[in-house]
């Protein structure tokens, strides 16, 4: 009987022997040796490496975009999956990887609670530990499914990429959904790379990215027979992944080359809606002061002053951010009259504000967008339909001793869903409040297609952290997917105007106070494939991946191969 330590050593030695026979001392020998050491890890070392690799992948996402780290992270994860004793062991590795990934990528959420000192102390462990642990389950499931598939080489990586993105889709849709930091967002720094999302959406871009960036993992696979042929096949698969990314980039370059110039106020003939000049207000009110009763009037006047500043005479519509009015504006005639005086002549001022009414015999509260004209009338409204758990309502509140983070004792009610709003002087648009903009294929009423997207938000909760920057990057992808321009007003965060290709026309940085005066870019004349079919395009891509897995060389393993991979 071999003690546990000796058994692990024997596993490493056996793996190294197989590496030596398969690599023939070739250029990938050191890589194969590294894989052998990685797959043989056990105990806390294995757990620590999985956590660290997950954190590395977070650095490939906005706002860092260190793409080479994605290659390291995915390669290491695939090797750890190889070294797992079956799907259960792979799930554990994937869960640890996911926990490190989401802890590093979403740590900034706790900033919202730190604003209130110890008042929300019971929620801290939920945010710090519980949220990453739940999200990590999806990566664990992808890892377990990949380990269960009898495939090697390129087929194994393709299968893993398919399971990863299927898990991302589930994460974005089950329960309330939380599709933050999807793999496709790693390319948000490149307008050209984003253009393929008009065809396959951010999930499809993620599938391409995981497959291509994870493919180098197969360069270290042991090849018992025909080493030159097998090694050549691995190199060809890696090159094919690189060429797929290059093709996506080339598609983007060609699409942008055919696009009209950016919309501009200085050039009335540019690609813009005639007769519309928007003033996007970013008041930059500190979150600790935003709901203060003592600052109530001061904050309101601050918004008014920014609205009527220099250049106001050419503006047709003004936009304030989410809950710019922290009171029930529709019930305050004096406040409505003040807004009417600040509204552009013949135009509207749109603002976020809470709204309440009695519905079905019950008093309800909504997080809303209100449009006010120069006569102090509310001429249009929209209620947020995708609420933030623990932020705007408490799920299972009869069982959980928690209160929501947003001010007020009552939970917010959800609106009916995506809606196209029609207001005087504007093309029809789809309002989106706060993180409603993060949900692919869920930002417009497809039966009543709008001409642009309006996102009002408040990222002041999260301070100077990656969160607000990630939010803006995510919002831009909706423009590419839907072929619609996006106008975004944030209390602070990043306010901006984005055209239908995801190009930034104008923006105000995080922590800045000011306004953006900008034209409204035009929507694309014809919606793209993703705008028409939504996530059905992902199903087609997953079907293609399944076919490629079956056609790929070395697409199946023998029982001996599978047992040889499991060293722990």
Image: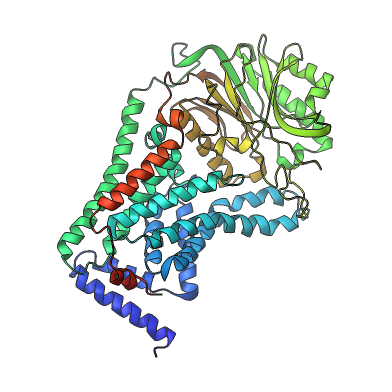
Q: Position of residue 518 (x, y in %)?
A: 54, 20
> Is residue 412 shown to the viewer in this render?
yes
Rendered image coloring scheme:
rainbow
Quadrant position of residue 343: top right
Residue 548 lies, with reference to residue 332, above or below; the image says: below
Quadrant for the N terminus, please. Answer: bottom left
> Is residue 480 shown to the viewer in this render?
no
Relative horizontal placement of residue 360, taking residue 422 as reference (left or right): right
Q: Position of residue 61 (x, y in %)?
A: 47, 47
Relative horizontal placement of residue 553, taking residue 197 as reference (left or right): left
Relative horizontal placement of residue 177, taking residue 367 as reference (left or right): left
User: At 35% across and 72% down in the image, what residue appears?
Assistant: 37
Quadrant position of residue 307: top right
Residue 443 lies, with reference to residue 38, above or below; the image says: above
Residue 461 lies, with reference to residue 110, above or below; the image says: above
Q: Position of residue 339 (x, y in %)?
A: 75, 19
């Amino acid at each position: 009987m071999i003690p546990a330590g000796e058994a692990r050593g024997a596993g490493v030695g056996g793996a190294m022997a197989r590496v030596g026979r398969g690599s023939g001392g070739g250029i990938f020998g050191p890589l194969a040796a590294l894989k052998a050491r990685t797959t043989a890890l056990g105990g806390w070392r294995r757990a620590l490496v999985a956590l660290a690799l997950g954190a590395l992948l977070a650095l490939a996402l906005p706002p860092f975009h260190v793409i080479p780290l994605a290659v390291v992270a995915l390669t290491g994860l695939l090797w750890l999956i190889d070294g797992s004793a079956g799907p259960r062991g792979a799930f554990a590795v994937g869960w640890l990887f996911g926990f490190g990934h989401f802890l590093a990528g979403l740590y900034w959420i706790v900033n919202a609670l730190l604003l209130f000192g110890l008042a929300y102390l019971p929620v801290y462990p939920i945010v710090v530990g519980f949220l990453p642990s739940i999200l990590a389950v999806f990566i664990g499931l992808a890892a377990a499914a990949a380990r269960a598939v009898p495939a090697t080489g390129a087929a194994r990586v393709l299968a893993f990429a398919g399971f990863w993105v299927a898990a991302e889709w589930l994460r974005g849709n089950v329960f309330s959904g939380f599709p933050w930091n999807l793999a496709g967002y790693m390319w948000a720094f490149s307008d050209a790379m984003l253009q393929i999302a008009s065809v396959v959406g951010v999930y499809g871009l993620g599938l391409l990215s995981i497959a291509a960036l994870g493919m180098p993992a197969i360069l270290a696979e042991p090849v018992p027979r025909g080493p030159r042929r097998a090694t050549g096949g691995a190199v060809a698969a890696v090159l094919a992944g690189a060429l797929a990314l290059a093709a996506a980039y080339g598609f983007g370059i060609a699409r942008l080359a055919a696009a009209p110039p950016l919309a501009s106020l200085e050039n009335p003939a540019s690609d813009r809606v005639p007769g519309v000049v928007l003033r996007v207000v970013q008041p930059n009110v500190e979150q600790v002061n935003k709901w203060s009763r003592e600052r109530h009037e001061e904050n309101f006047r601050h918004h008014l002053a920014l609205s009527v500043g220099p250049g106001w005479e050419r503006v047709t519509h003004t936009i304030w951010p989410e809950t710019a009015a922290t009171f029930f504006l529709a019930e305050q005639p004096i406040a409505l009259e003040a807004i009417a005086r600040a509204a552009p002549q013949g135009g509207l001022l749109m603002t976020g504000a809470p709204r309440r009414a009695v519905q079905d015999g019950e008093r309800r509260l909504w997080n809303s967008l209100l449009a006010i004209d120069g006569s102090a009338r509310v001429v249009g409204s929209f209620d947020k339909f995708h609420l933030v758990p623990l932020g705007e309502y408490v799920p299972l509140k009869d069982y959980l001793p928690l209160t929501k983070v947003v001010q007020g004792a009552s939970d917010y009610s959800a609106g009916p869903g995506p809606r196209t709003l029609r207001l005087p002087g504007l093309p029809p648009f789809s309002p989106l409040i706060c993180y409603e903009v993060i949900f692919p294929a869920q930002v417009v009423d497809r039966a009543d297609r709008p001409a642009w997207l309006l996102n009002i938000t408040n990222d002041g909760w999260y301070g100077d952290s990656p969160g607000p920057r990630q939010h803006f990057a995510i919002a831009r992808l909706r423009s590419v997917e839907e072929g619609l321009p996006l106008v975004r007003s944030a209390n602070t965060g990043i306010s901006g105007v984005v055209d239908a290709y995801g190009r930034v026309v104008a923006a105000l940085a995080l922590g800045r106070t000011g306004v953006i005066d900008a034209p409204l870019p035009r929507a694309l004349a014809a919606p793209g494939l993703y705008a028409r079919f939504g996530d059905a395009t992902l199903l087609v891509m997953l079907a293609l991946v399944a076919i490629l897995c079956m056609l790929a060389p070395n697409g199946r393993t023998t029982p001996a191969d599978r047992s040889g991979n499991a060293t722990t």
